[in-house]
Image (cartoon, rainbow, N blue to C red):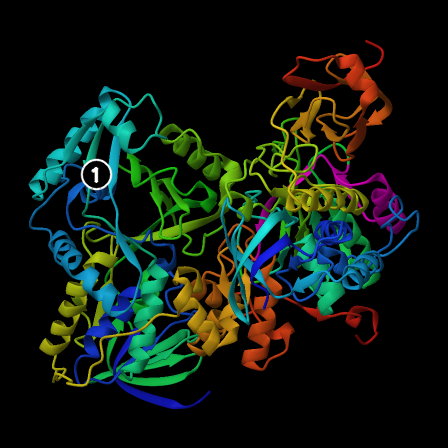
């Protein structure tokens, strides 16, 4: 494509950060475009984000202790002046409404942190103290009180801390997909599979070359996450460095739903977490991980030793968990800035007045509403005219999920479109109607269908629905099955037709 | 659309479900319904285009589709009703169920139900195979469906992890399609499937079989580019320094099957943690009265002939139950897996009743004797975990066993001891 495109603001990176900035800008009469190298939105850090938001309380205190390992020695764990913490608290108050506007499923989650010995009790005391400084008094629980709430927890538990709220659970990809759908409706262009390959600063903007063509932009927002340094480098404005850590997470079969009623975690420890989360779909999400440093931003290969470590640590908390219950595992790569590992980079580059960095470290999703406003304000300061758009449409409706509908509603939906009666993914009970709707909303790959509908996310991991999904994608997109990909690029699933390799015709 | 009261509802239209429905209908019931998720009857038999089916049941050598056809035709001739493209989405302990199809939701109230959902394959993830997550990783059965039903070849160079029957059959099938099967990798010191498949599918086609090896890593970002294979020790742990990398574009997994019992759970049916299937009695009745189960969703069989027999037994019992027969609550005996026995099906039997017992051993052994309690029931030359052993417990054994028992252990010991 050699088409030349123009925009006022070009956002590089269609993760939740880039998309939230785009949403904020869409409230003004500003021409916005988002590009991303991946075939779908939210495929970088967003996808492997844990999907929890907390602005105070136990999870917040736990996170501060956990991340303290990344701080320079001697820094206080809690600094009330820290911008990130203020944004977290503000964002937490806003996210429920935002999720409702975008029809992103979410729920409040209880968290209990537990201790098995005196040292761990001391760690609980530290968490209780930090939480108090943040304005939340946590409740101490004794052994019997813990077991009454979580009967499957290791009976050797001696004490615990309870936080009934201050924790929202959701799926981060649901959020990215919902944002993207709503942005398109508000006229924001999102160009996927568009790798930025070059950038030239001009007076009053940039010329950005992508694998899908050249884009002229007045402002560039670097929301490229892991690749933030690469983008800044290309623009000739790099004045920062990033470091990366990786950790491995596991998902357990939903037949264990109910094994834990809320989040259960070990007393907070710097650099190491043992946390079991019930998810919206009933699976237990194991985050029994450490921050392991890596230089490789693509190092997403899982590791058997980490799986074993995760399971052993999960069993310390809840002995009934077994490696046999694992249905999926994945690596998440986290980014920290070297300049100030505590903070996010939300700034106008010192090297170019029209280049802004929006690089967020975890926990990042909760800060996005105020962070997006800050970026917008900075753009205004740099001369972007911000006139409110009266026709901004904040709402988006999700794909109907037959498994969540009451029988009468489900019956009605099937009567309108019989494809909602045909179940394609048996593990997650996903209908053909949902899959077709996901394609009409932009899914182009098996992975795109998975994140939009949950087809293939269950225990058989596409064993049964895989061929059906490929067939539906082929039919709806009008391409041969051999062209359907797993996750874009060269990830074709079926390489040949029958008899092709032996010179015959099928 | 079928709804309301039916005599027997059979969930699943594979070999077990077909056999159950046929027997239930033959016993004279009015309304026998098969509820099948897919678009056709016969289940996985339809993609098993190789031969070797029916050697025991029909004493003939049939292909999977031929074997299925006989039962499908019979079910139609008898007037068994069939709901295709229909999935049971809710099931309660009172047997009432909600079925979803393109025609809508329907509620069925069966007098008796047979669960015949079959099994699913272990995935790469359930085996915790580390590495990247590219396209090109399939379970052997999914690949079989692509090749034999849909007409596609997943890739040109294949490594197969696990020597289950489907994996070995796919090794041969893909070789015939011009695919290079680089290796079949098995963690055990012997193949996981039948000996006949080892000989006819691997040795006859010169496909390398690497016993006591496993896949320790998958490579490739978008498509599989290679896998690392290593030798394992006795505890299946990879031995450092034995790794080698095999270039390939596809990895097939044939490392075990898991009975499908989500509906059983919904209905409150007790499951056996070892088999992964429902706990049943000698009449194939589960812990929930009026719900029966047979075939691979009770325990994974190696031969379809056995699946058919179990389905028939479940169908006959379900018909009797629909006709008013109640389970005897007295004289129940729990069967236990004893020395070198990994499981016994059924898990409970009624004192004095004739019962067919299916067992699997834990370790291969030669010159063994099977015992029920202290009573020897069968001498066997060689046993191995991949081959199920069936035997009858009849009046003769009951006479020796005597009364007043509430538990019996099944053991497999050397005859030389």
Along the line of sight, the residue nearer the viewer: B57 or B389: B57
- Quarter holding residue A404: bottom left
- Quarter holding residue B2: bottom right
The outermost residue toward the bottom is: A3
- Quarter holding residue B405: top right
> Residue B368, can we see it?
no
Q: Is residue A137 left or right of residue A257?
A: left
At which x and y percent is residue B258? 62, 43
The outermost residue toward the top is: B417
| Pointer 1 chain | A
Q: How many badges with numbers are in the image? A: 1
Question: For numbered disc 1, what is the local secondary structure?
Answer: helix
Along the line of sight, the residue nearer the viewer: A100 or A477: A100
Range shown magenta = B191-220
At which x and y percent is residue A452? 42, 66
At which x and y percent is residue A213? 41, 84
Residue identifier under label 1: A65
Along the line of sight, the residue nearer the viewer: A213 or B417: B417
State whether residue B262 is above or below residue A389.
Answer: above
Quarter of the image that includes the C terminus of chain B: top right
The outermost residue toward the right is: B60
Q: Is residue A129 left or right of residue B54?
A: left
State whether residue A62 is above or below residue B348.
Answer: below
Is A101 magenta? The answer is: no
Q: Residue at x 37, y 52 (%)?
A: A333
> Residue A378, can we see it?
yes
At which x and y percent is residue A194? 42, 76
State whether residue B42 is above or below residue B123.
Answer: below
> Is the residue marked by circle 1 packed among few (<14), some (14-19), or many (20+) residues within 10 Å?
many
Quarter of the image that includes the N terminus of chain B: bottom right
């Amino acid at each position: 494509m050699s088409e030349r495109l123009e925009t006022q603001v070009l956002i590089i990176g269609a993760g939740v950060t880039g998309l939230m900035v785009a949403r904020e800008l869409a409230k003004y009469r500003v021409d916005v475009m988002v590009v991303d190298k991946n075939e779908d939105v939210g495929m970088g850090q967003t996808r492997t984000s844990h999907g929890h938001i907390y602005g105070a309380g136990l999870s917040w205190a736990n996170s501060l202790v956990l991340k303290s390992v990344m701080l320079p020695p001697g820094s206080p764990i809690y600094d009330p002046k820290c911008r990130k913490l203020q944004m977290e608290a503000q964002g937490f108050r806003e996210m429920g409404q935002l999720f409702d506007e975008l029809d992103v499923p979410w729920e409040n989650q209880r968290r209990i942190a537990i201790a098995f010995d005196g040292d761990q009790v001391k760690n609980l005391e530290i968490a209780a103290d930090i939480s108090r400084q943040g304005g939340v008094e946590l409740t101490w629980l004794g052994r019997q009180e813990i077991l009454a709430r979580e009967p499957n927890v290791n009976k050797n538990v001696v004490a615990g801390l309870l936080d009934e709220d201050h924790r929202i659970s959701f799926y981060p990809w649901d959020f990215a997909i919902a944002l993207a759908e709503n942005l398109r409706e508000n006229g924001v262009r999102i160009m996927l599979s568009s790798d930025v390959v070059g950038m030239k600063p001009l007076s009053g903007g940039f010329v950005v070359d992508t694998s899908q063509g050249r884009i002229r932009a007045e402002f560039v927002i670097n929301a490229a996450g892991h690749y933030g340094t690469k983008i800044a480098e290309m623009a000739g404005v790099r004045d920062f460095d990033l470091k990366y850590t990786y950790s491995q997470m596991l998902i357990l079969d939903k037949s264990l739903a109910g094994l834990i009623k809320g989040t259960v975690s070990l007393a907070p420890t710097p650099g190491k977490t043992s946390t079991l989360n019930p998810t919206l779909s009933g699976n237990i999400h194991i985050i029994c991980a450490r921050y392991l440093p890596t230089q490789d931003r693509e190092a997403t290969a899982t590791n058997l030793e980490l799986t074993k470590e995760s399971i052993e640590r999960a069993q310390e908390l809840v002995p009934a968990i077994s490696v046999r219950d694992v249905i999926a595992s994945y690596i998440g790569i986290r980014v920290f800035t070297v300049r100030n590992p505590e903070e996010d980079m939300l700034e106008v580059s010192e090297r170019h007045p029209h280049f802004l960095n929006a690089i967020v470290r975890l926990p990042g999703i909760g800060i996005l509403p105020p962070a997006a406003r800050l970026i917008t304000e900075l753009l205004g300061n740099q001369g972007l005219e911000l006139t409110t758009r009266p026709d901004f449409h904040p709402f988006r409706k999700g794909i109907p999920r037959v498994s969540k509908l009451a029988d009468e509603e489900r019956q009605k939906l099937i009567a309108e479109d019989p494809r909602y009666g045909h179940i394609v993914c048996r593990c997650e009970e996903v209908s053909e109607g949902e899959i077709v709707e996901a394609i009409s909303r932009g899914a182009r790959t098996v992975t795109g269908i998975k994140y939009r509908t949950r087809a293939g996310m269950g225990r058989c991991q596409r064993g049964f629905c895989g061929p059906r999904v490929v067939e539906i994608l082929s039919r709806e997109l009008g391409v041969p099955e051999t062209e359907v990909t797993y996750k874009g690029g060269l990830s074709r699933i079926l390489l040949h037709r029958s008899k092709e390799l032996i010179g015959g015709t099928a | 659309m079928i709804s309301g009261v039916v005599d027997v509802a059979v969930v699943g239209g594979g070999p077990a479900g077909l056999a159950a429905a046929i027997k239930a209908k033959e016993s004279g019931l009015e309304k026998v319904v098969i509820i099948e998720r897919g678009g056709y009857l016969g289940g996985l038999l339809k993609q098993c285009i190789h031969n070797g089916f029916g050697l025991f049941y029909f004493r003939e050598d049939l292909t999977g589709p031929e074997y299925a056809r006989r039962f499908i035709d019979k079910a139609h001739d008898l007037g068994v009703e069939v709901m295709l493209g229909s999935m049971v989405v809710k099931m309660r302990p009172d047997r009432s169920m909600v079925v979803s199809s393109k025609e809508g939701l329907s509620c069925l109230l069966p007098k008796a139900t047979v669960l015949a959902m079959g099994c699913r394959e272990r995935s790469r993830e359930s085996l915790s195979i580390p590495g990247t997550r590219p396209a090109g990783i399939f379970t052997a059965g999914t690949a079989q469906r692509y090749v034999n039903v849909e007409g596609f070849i997943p890739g040109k160079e294949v490594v197969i992890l696990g020597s289950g029957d489907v994996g070995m059959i796919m090794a041969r099938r893909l070789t015939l399609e011009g695919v290079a099967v680089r290796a079949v990798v098995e963690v055990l010191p012997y193949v996981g499937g039948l000996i006949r498949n080892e000989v006819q599918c691997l040795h006859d086609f010169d496909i390398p079989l690497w016993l006591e090896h496993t896949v320790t890593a998958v490579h490739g970002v978008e498509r599989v580019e290679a896998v690392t294979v290593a030798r394992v020790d006795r505890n299946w742990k990879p031995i450092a320094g034995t790794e080698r990398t095999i270039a390939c574009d596809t990895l097939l997994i044939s490392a075990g099957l898991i009975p499908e019992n989500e509906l059983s759970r919904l209905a409150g049916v007790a499951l056996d943690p070892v088999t992964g299937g429902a706990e049943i009695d000698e009449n194939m009745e589960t812990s929930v009265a009026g719900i029966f189960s047979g075939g691979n969703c009770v325990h994974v069989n190696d031969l379809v002939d056995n699946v058919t027999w179990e389905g028939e037994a479940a169908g006959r019992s379900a018909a009797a139950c629909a006709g008013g027969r109640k389970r005897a609550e007295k004289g129940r005996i729990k069967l236990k897996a004893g020395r070198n026995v990994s499981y016994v099906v059924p898990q409970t039997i009624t004192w004095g009743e004739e019962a067919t017992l299916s067992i699997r051993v834990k370790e291969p052994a030669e010159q063994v004797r099977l015992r029920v309690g202290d009573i020897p029931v069968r001498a066997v030359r060689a046993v191995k975990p991949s081959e199920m052993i069936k035997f009858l417990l009849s009046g003769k054994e009951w006479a020796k066993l005597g009364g007043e028992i509430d538990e019996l252990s099944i053991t497999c010991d050397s005859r030389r001891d």
